[in-house]
Amino acid sequence: MTEARWPDDRRARSARHTPGTPCWVSLMAHDVAATQEFYAALFGWTYRPGPQQLGPYVRALLDGYEVAGIGQLPDRQLPIAWTPYLASDDADSTAETVRHCGGTVGVGPLVAGKAGRMAVASDPAGAVFGIWQAAAHTGAGVAGVPGTVTWNELLTRETVEVAKFYQTIFGFAEEAATTPGLDYLTLSLEGRPVASVRGVGQELPRDRGAHWMTYFETVDVDASAARVVELGGHVVRPAEPGRYGRVATVADPEGAIFTLIRSERNAAK
């Protein structure tokens, strides 16, 4: 067993993703227009509206590639968070399996126009994730380059039970880190690492509970974290060396938390 691996830079193809692969991220915000402005200034995103079936919703573009979604949160009491969507060949079947395995399906499954079919669920520990059955929209058009998602990590109290949940549903292979005292698993599909699970015990924030963390690649973590503050957000965890590069955890003006990373693989280029 080896330390968890980090994936290579990649561009998504038109073919469907292997079921279980994180293929999209979406943020539901209170003020969609202001949120668009924040991420446009931070990452250089432009936007395309739709699908209309999701209400006020836009798809963020970087160099013409779709990279993320931003929509209107229907209930002001719901938490604002980036949510990864895991690919599925049958959203209805996957949602039913989630229920049988102790998870909860909070939204859907429902049709998102010609784009595909989706559901929003939570695992037994309460971490929210999406299910995406692709039609016209297969997912992010580019990943792993500055301004795009480069990784998704589940933060939970301990990895064992919740990893079984995702393994049962999506067939992940698990690889445990060898560092003593580190509760960390890499989840792989067809021999390729696609996500990770990190058990943090009592360090799990009480106000958030178990949750998925979205990592966005950036050229300069320190400069990007400072830019977040300039744009009205704040730094949750200052920039520091991480396992796979320099990282900083930040929050946008509405409180959606995400991690900035300058991956070692990109820093070496």
Image (spheres, rainbow, N blue to C red):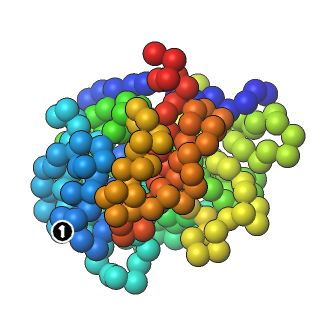
Toward the viewer: 223 or 124? 223
Which x, y percent locates residue 40?
23, 49
Which x, y percent locates residue 22?
44, 43
The residue carrying pointer 1 sits among few (fewer than 14), some (14 to 19) or many (20 or more) residues within 10 Å by Cα, namely: some
Residue named by callout 1 = 55
Q: Is residue 171 above or below residue 161?
A: above
Q: Amino acid at mark 1?
A: Gly
Which image quarter: residue 111?
Answer: bottom left
Which image quarter: residue 66?
Answer: top left
Q: What residue is drawn where x is 46% and y is 69%? A: 105
Toward the viewer: 181 or 55? 181
Residue 125 shows up from this direction: no
Residue 106 shows up from this direction: yes
Q: What residue is drawn where x is 75% and y is 27%? A: 2
Q: Is residue 28 above or below residue 84?
A: below
Q: What residue is drawn where x is 39% and y is 62%? A: 233
Which image quarter: residue 145?
Answer: top left
Which x, y percent locates residue 243?
66, 35
Toward the viewer: 247 or 135? 247
Which x, y percent locates residue 229?
39, 58
